[in-house]
Image (spheres, helix red, strand yellow):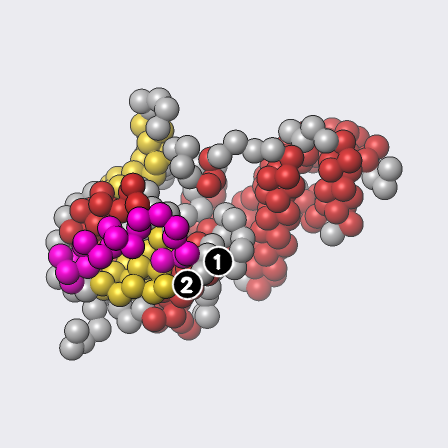
Amino acid sequence: MSQSPLLSIVVAVYNGEKFLDQFFESIEQQQLNSYELILVNDGSTDGSLAVIDNWKERLQNVQLIQQTNQGVSVARNSGLAVATGKYLTFPDIDDKIYPGMYNTLLNMAETGNLDVATCNGRYVYEKRKDVHPIFPPERLASTGVIAGHIWLKQALDSRKFLHVTWLNIYRRAFIQQHAFHFEPGLRHQDIPWTTEVLLAAERVQYTSEQFYDYYIHSESVSHKPDNDDTLMRSARHYMKILEMLEAINQRYAAKAKQISACRWQIAKEGLGIIHTFDCMKDEEKKRIIINEFFDRGIWRLIWKNACTLRLRWRLGRRYFRLKPYRHA
């Protein structure tokens, strides 16, 4: 292309053979005039490459990056490093993007000189017919152009905010200015990413139009059944997330102080870690991870950020269940 595209679509691909045709069709239906599609093949072992080859000429502006399997964060970072578009987006291949999503967000971004443009979507469950909005419209209505920390406060205060990258487009110069990247090897890396991006952003706009279906299905890594080993890994991922959120709150202290929910989300995710311990069956593994939880200072971090009596009461009840495991 002779000039930089308006939008870079950065996509991590790992064993997505059964989803890629639908994904490419949804990109084609966007009818974008200026875009590049950056596919990062993260060590797929199925027929993903054959599907990509079938679509490359049809979609035209496609760049394929090959790497050994390193996870979605590294794949996104690889795509981010070579992206040239004015704006960036990071959809998942197993979800559905409705026509008009990117043109709507691009129009918002260009008109409002935005750092971040964002929209609503829907949860779609594989095993039941339940479909509902990700952000309930009665709790989060469309906005004008507002500061990122104001949107973050509104979103977190709704208690229905989902930290995701795929509902958003980002101005690439803004991302580069702050050297934002996805934390390698971290599951649910969207939580610290979204929090910091919104605390840094000066101009953000949200539309409650639903343009994206988030599929909750058995193929998703995030929704596979857990055992004690996966529960331990999950607890460690969330401990890292809480440490990152605390560091973010310190970096943006003036803004974070205006948003009590920045502290609330640390306490809430901390309660989730404790629930993970309750689900473990092996007493020795539970003892190991609970001691790590205390030794890393995660309990102190959660308690410090529990800013309501109700949260502290819930934590206090659980403390006495954890205490017997301390260096037993």
> Disc number at residue 70?
1
How far apart, in angstroms, are the residues tagged by discs 1 and 2? 8 Å
User: Looking at the picture, how far across and down is residue 285, in whole percent?
Assistant: 73, 37
- Point 14% across, 48% down: residue: 29
Label 1 close to label 2 by CB (< 8 Å): yes
Look at label 1 and name its amino acid: Gln
Q: Is residue 147 left or right of residue 58?
A: right
- Point 44% across, 46% down: residue: 163
User: Looking at the picture, how far across and down is residue 236, in whole percent?
Assistant: 64, 47
* Quadrant showing the C terminus: top right
Looking at the rendered structure, the secondary structure element under dot 2 is strand
User: Looking at the picture, how far across and down is residue 13, in whole percent?
Assistant: 35, 53
- Foreground of the two, 256 or 134: 134
- Point 46% across, 65% down: residue: 180
Look at label 2 and name its amino acid: Gln
- Foreground of the two, 172 or 54: 54
Q: Residues within 10 Å of mark 1 (few under 14, many from 20)?
A: few
Q: Name the quadrant containing residue 322.
A: top right
Q: Which residue is mark 2?
A: 67
- Foreground of the two, 84 or 211: 84
Query: Does any portion of residue 131 appear in the rendered image?
Result: yes
User: Looking at the picture, how far across and down is residue 36, in whole percent?
Assistant: 23, 64
Q: Which residues are magenta?
A: 41-60
Q: Is residue 50 left or right of residue 236?
A: left
